Amino acid sequence: MSRLRFFKRTVKTDAWLAFVLQGERLAAASVVRVPGAKPRVTLAGVFHGWATQEGLEKAARELHANLYRCSTVLAGGLYQVLTIDALNVPPEELRTAVRWRLKDLLDFHVDDATVDVLDIPVDKSAMVRQHSMFAIAARNSVIEQRQKLFALARIQLLAIDIPEMAQRNISALLETEGRGLALLSFDEDGGLLTVSFKGELYLSRRIDVTLEQLLDPDHDRKHGRFEKITLELQRSLDHFDRQFHFINVARLLLAPSAITGLEEYLSSNLYTPVARFGLAEVFDLSGVPDLAGPDIEQQLFIALGAALRFEETVL
């Protein structure tokens, strides 16, 4: 078990406490937004072997989960994110209409799906506005199993999030005013590319290369994966430029990890400037001084992004 320092709370707060289950590992984080300053991390911990009901119960006690609004994040592969044309229907009919649109697009029956939608803002200056939205779908059984797990652990779960939104929350804090930002992260589920603009998510792409594969010491295998990532990025960013020509992507940022050589490789093969960043560029970490190093930052990345949640999309 690995533990990080956190502030002890004795009164209920409106802050989110986000739990991320990744394999046998449990990551948890809470963040307080501070006007005019970096969000302050008040709690951050990684618990190895605790991604079980018993582990969640222990974490709930130690972290005083009953004092927070609690959320969890689905792992990649447990849901689908699809881009569809916006539907011209009244708001109260939107989800029903989206379900009808998704019936031939999902890899499972739409009657077995929990569905939500997220709007993709349009170019307000364009004469003809191509309007799209994200449709997010997960099997009902996945949602029910996650809810049951937390209920048995005596954690009142108020939201189930997805990594795309957690990553968008961090990306929004790193944007250059008036410019779009691409952000690329890797974990056990593979790579996740997002593009945000004015705090909104405009692009989401999964890349079938895992963190473990990129930590492979074999030079040839590693560089073969670098080539695959580069090709995926080129295609995705070119597609984005054609679809959202009113957004200029200023740079591509690499999320914290122990991967070596990728920044240099991408910088040599992409027109978009590439840089790596650390969590200290986004958050006030003064309350969690033990949160340092690429491994622990990578393990907490999605949990911290989810803890920045504001009311928007719930599966």
Image: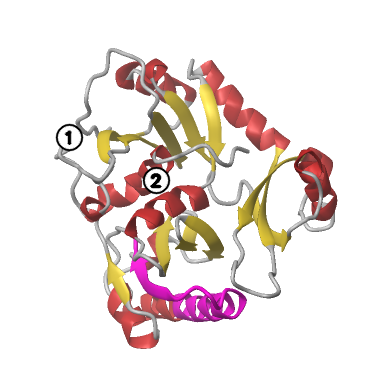
Q: Height in image: 236 above or below 154? A: below
At horizontal 33% and vertical 86% (from top left) the residue drawn is 268
User: Gap between marks 2 and 1, in whole Å?
Assistant: 17 Å
Image quadrant where residue 300 sits:
top left
Q: In this view, does 246 lie to the left or right of 210?
A: right
Q: In this view, does 103 lie to the left or right of 31?
A: right
Nearest the eye: 207 or 218: 207
Q: In this view, does 192 lie to the left or right of 122?
A: left
**Which residue type does callout 1 highlight?**
Gly
Q: Is residue 116 left or right of residue 194?
A: right
**Which residue type does callout 2 highlight?**
Gly
Pointer 1 residue = 287
Nearest the eye: 37 or 315: 37
At horizontal 40% and vertical 22% (from top left) the residue drawn is 68
What is the secondary structure assignment of the residue under circle 2? helix
Mark 2 or 1, nearer chain start: 1
Q: Height in image: 296 above or below 209? A: above
Where is residue 135 drawn, in percent x and y? 68, 52
Looking at the rendering, the stretch of residues picked out in magenta corresponds to 228-255
Where is residue 156 drawn, in percent x and y? 51, 19
Q: Height in image: 250 above or below 2? A: below
Q: Indicate yes or no whether the magenta region holds residue 231.
A: yes
The quadrant of the image that shows the N terminus is: top left
The number of discs equals: 2
Q: Residue 305 shows which numbered tag?
A: 2
Q: Residue 29 shows which numbered tag?
A: none
Nearest the eye: 80 or 90: 90
Mark 2 surroundings within 10 Å by alpha-carbon count, few (fewer than 14), some (14 through 19), many (20 or more) = many
At horizontal 48% and vertical 60% (from top left) the residue drawn is 190
Where is residue 140 drawn, in percent x and y? 72, 35
Residue 244 shows up from this direction = yes
Residue 82 shows up from this direction = no
